[in-house]
Image (cartoon, rainbow, N blue to C red):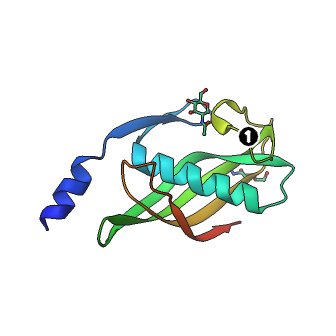
Amino acid sequence: MVCIGILFASIFSALIVSGEGMIQHHNSNVISVANFAMNFHNRMSSYPYAFKVVDIISDTTQLYPPARVKYTLQIQAEQTVCENHASVNLTHCALQPNPENMTCSFTVLAVPGNNDIPKRLLSDHCA
Ligand SMILES: *[C@@H]1O[C@H](CO)[C@@H](O)[C@H](O)[C@H]1NC(C)=O
Ligand SMILES: *[C@@H]1O[C@H](CO)[C@@H](O)[C@H](O)[C@H]1NC(C)=O
């Protein structure tokens, strides 16, 4: 059980700003995992414009030995004005006026706090 403490000691809280300018507190690892999954989903889709995460509805984490964590996320996404291509950086992409929205469920394996170790998307469902 000691390893749980070590793992989660490296987790910090952060802010995300949603499309409406609301500020919500979320763990920076959860935000990073959500954005990774959203980008992957955009890549695999034929949307003309990329979607971005505007809210994290729920997140649960589960240890996945030896060092990874399985994240199960439900997020709200809205369509941006940025064309959906591989090099898009969603950070500064504005939302469409009256954007299309969808709710996505993602399951991702990642090492918290370590962006050098590739994350793995295990499941991906948006509707
Ligand atoms: C996207 O742009 C932001 C701000 O310019 C930058 O901090 C971030 O590293 C970029 N992300 C990627 C994946 O290049
Ligand atoms: C999502 O889009 C639908 C149809 O445009 C709209 O009725 C609904 O309010 C939107 N939901 C959110 C959370 O923005």
Q: In which quarter of the image is residue 5?
A: bottom left
User: Residue at coordinates 71% horizontally, 66% vertically from top-left?
Assistant: 127
Q: Quadrant of ligand 1?
A: top right
The answer to whether 47 appears left or right of 102 in the picture is right
In what element is the residue under mark 1?
A: loop
Q: In which quarter of the image is residue 52?
A: top right
Quarter of the image with the N terminus in it: bottom left
Residue 6 screen position, x and y as percent:
19, 54
* Residue type for callout 1: Val
Disc 1 designates what residue? 88
Dot 1: within a 10 Å radius of its alpha carbon, few (fewer than 14), some, or many (20 or more) residues? few
Residue 46 screen position, x and y as percent:
85, 59
Q: Nearer the viewer, residue 87 or 37?
A: 87
Q: Which residue lies furthest to the left in this view?
A: 2
Query: With respect to residue 114, does 93 lie above or below?
Result: above
User: Residue at coordinates 39% horizontally, 36% vertically from top-left?
Assistant: 14
User: Residue at coordinates 81% horizontally, 36% vertically from top-left?
Assistant: 81
Residue 45 screen position, x and y as percent:
79, 61
Question: For the image shown, how many numbered marks are present on the structure?
Answer: 1
Q: Nearer the viewer, residue 64 or 72?
A: 64
